[in-house]
Image (cartoon, grey):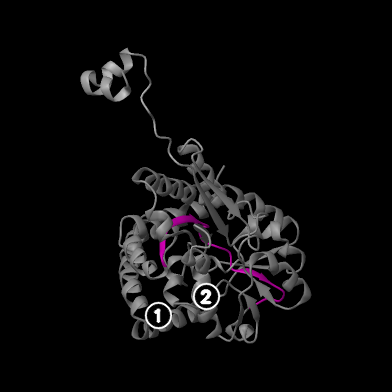
Amino acid sequence: MDRRSILKHTGMAGVLAAGIAPAVHAQAAIRWRLTSSFPKALDTIHGAADVFAKKVGEMTGGRFQVTVHAPGELVPAFGVVDAVQAGTVEAGHTAPYYYFGKDDTFAIGTAIPFGLNSRQLTSWYYEGNGLKLFREFYNQYNIVNFPGGNTGAQMGGWFRKEVKTVADLKGLKFRVGGFAGKVLSRMGVVPQNIPGGEIYQALEKGTIDATEWIGPYDDEKLGFQKVAKNYYYPGFWEGGAQLDFYINKAAFNALSPENKAIVEMAASHAHTTMQAIYDARNPAALKRLVAGGAKVQAFPKAIMDAAFKESMALYDELSQSNPNWKKIYGDYAAFRKEQNLWFRFTEGQFDRYMQSAKLP
């Protein structure tokens, strides 16, 4: 008697009783390529993509493999959007604000000057309208996005000379990430958009006068302290800089519901892990930088105030000229206002006390 006859007359129990194994259709293996905007030497920020790929593989028993590629292996550092949009690669890991030249709205996905901090941004994405609004925005680029890590509040960067007044910024050639240059240029700065792997050489050769990257752990790895000693804080343009995983829409839609959920969970795990690593490693790195001669100092209030004024003016202008910006920033700004009201009574007050206390 063949399988079909047994199944017809006795059902699955008959198949098992007859010792005949039922036919099993093996799930096809999935292979994705993910291109990163960050060099492998930066194990924290590049490493978030590695965490994502590892988790996808583990949760699928190796049936879904994601290979991670550094800038230049498949596409340039700033070529992620184009590559994912065209389907050249299935996925990318990048900072959305690198692509503000396509539309200023991209910047809100990472950080804008005097914006949300990391916890607030994550809250806006997962519990506010952030993810919904950006899914609508990225749809025009054939991209499905997932939060992919956050650096937390960043440092203000390394300067060859001290900056004491707004006038000291005039003509300063400053490597600064993406959109923030729009604000700083209104204050006389000459922004330079340079990939992470190329910054040290530019600073060493004097092609630029100052640079910011992220914070002590990464900055130490890149060696900026060797050629500039004035280390300023805070990076008011990156109060909580988020990265994203960009997935080609067709590639994502081709996944089973189970694999879609796995991609989502792996991205969420990488998102949390990246900031945990930065928070754990930055304190010791800052101590080493200071021991090596770095002069850590705050930006003067006059510079902060001038930057805040220019930022708000720019946002008003963009809301009048860019419908995408207006739609997303309007919701973002309303969420920011409510968050700041709450944090003023809790997180802010607690942090101010603890950071002024003499701990044992």
Q: Which mark is residue 315?
A: 1
Q: Nearer the viewer, residue 277 or 57?
A: 57
The stretch in magenta equals 142-163
The location of residue 207, given as percent across then percent down, is 73, 78
For marks 1 and 2 on the same chain, the one whose residue lies earlier in the sequence: 2
Q: Quadrant of residue 143?
A: bottom left
Q: In this view, does 315 lie to the left or right of 165?
A: left
The image quadrant of residue 147 is: bottom left
Q: Is residue 162 magenta?
A: yes
Which residue is depicted at the point 48% across and 61% down?
240
Q: Give above or below for 6 relative to 274.
A: above
**Which residue matches tag 2?**
180
Is any atom of residue 73 visible in this view? yes
Secondary element type, mark 2? helix
Residue at disc 1, secondary structure: helix
Position of residue 198 measured from the top left corner of the image (x, y, whole percent): 70, 68
Instruction: Give me the residue at 22% from left, 23% from top.
Output: 8
Q: Note whether residue 229 is visible.
A: no
Q: How crowded is mark 2: few (under 14 residues within 10 Å), some or many (20 or more)?
A: many
Q: In this view, does 299 lie above or below 151?
A: below
Q: Distance between the residues labelled 1 and 2?
A: 12 Å
Q: Residue 345, percent across and down?
A: 34, 58
Residue 345, above or below 182: above
Is 226 colored magenta in this rendering? no
Horizontal side of residue 59 vs 170, given as left or right: left
Residue 223, percent across and down? 73, 61
Which of these two is toward me, 288 or 41?
A: 41
The residue type indicated by label 1 comes to Tyr
State the quadrant of the N terminus.
top left
Residue, far front: 1
Neighbour tally class for label 1: few under 14, some 14-19, many 20 plus, Cα within 10 Å: some
- The amino acid type, in three-letter code, at marker 2 is Ala
